[in-house]
Amino acid sequence: MLKKNIIFVLFVFGISLQAGCCYHRSNPPMLPNAWYGKECNAKSLEDSPEQAKLHVMVMYRGVSCVHTTLRVYSRTKGPVFWDPAGGFAADHHYAGQARRHRRYDALVKEGPVRENDVLVEKVPDLNQYLDWRKRIDTHAVEIFEFNIPDEQAEEIWTILRYGTKRSHPKGRFSTNAMGGLCGFSVAKFLHRFAEDIVKVDTVWHPHNLAKQLYKENPDRVIIYRDGHLSFYIPAENHVE
């Protein structure tokens, strides 16, 4: 009886992860109506040697939020890209929902090197990753951009690249993530290791993380939507 109850709870939990709270009427669903928007070009997404940055990306397909990634650019160490349980530069096919749709089995066979869900060599820039997301039928992407001090970028870069041990002040951390837990993994990481940049609660679904990030004063939010790029800032920050 206990075994059946456990199986039932796990089944309900799995269904809720795949469906329950991830369906929306619009993409991106949490973008505040009062924010000022303007078209931008791909060049504006390139790394600048003058500014360290933290990027959190939330992906949508149709009416569902489907994935979350995190990228840090350090002026001294370069970029590092965390794709928890994702498929970019992976040597395996997609699992779960994507397995039922063969057109999503797009692999990156050459180029970036992936280690423990982190892209550690030939790290893709934002445009390269967006190009790949388009090929696997991603309809919208939010990119939350935060300008951060060099020392914070270096610290986050090191944690993502090498993880932490139990002796670390904030405990052990590994970038390996289970399928379906990308939003949870990124939210938990931000909660533990980036509280000086953003203050977020650990949530399951990517769109719930996005909802919190809009309130954390991002320097801008870049949005890809059906082939178009725009950036958004709070209306009060807009200067003609």
Image: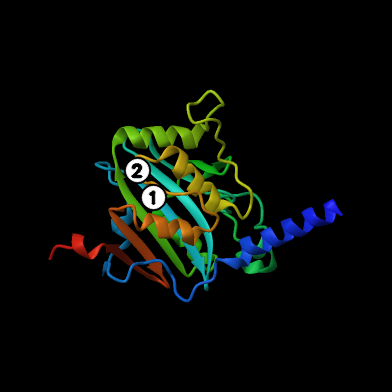
Residue, disc 2 = 197
Residue 119: tell me if it is visible: yes
Q: Which quarter of the figure has residue 10?
A: bottom right
Of pointers 2 and 1, the one earlier in the residue sequence: 1
- Which residue, as the protein is rendered here, is positioned at the far bottom? 25
Residue 194: x and y in percent read 40, 40
Residue 182: x and y in percent read 55, 52
Q: Amino acid at mark 1?
A: His
Residue, disc 1 = 55
- Which residue, as the protein is rendered here, is positioned at the far left? 240
Element on which disc 1 rests: strand
Instruction: Give the residue at x 73% y 60%.
Output: 11
Residue 201: x and y in percent read 46, 49
Task: In this rendered view, identify the residue nearer to me: 196 or 178.
Answer: 196
Instruction: Give the residue at x 48% y 42%.
Output: 189
Residue 17: x and y in percent read 62, 60
Q: Quadrant of the C terminus?
A: bottom left
Instruction: Give the residue at x 19% y 62%.
Output: 236
Mark 2 to mark 1 CA distance (whole Å): 11 Å
Q: Where is 11 relative to 182, above or below? A: below
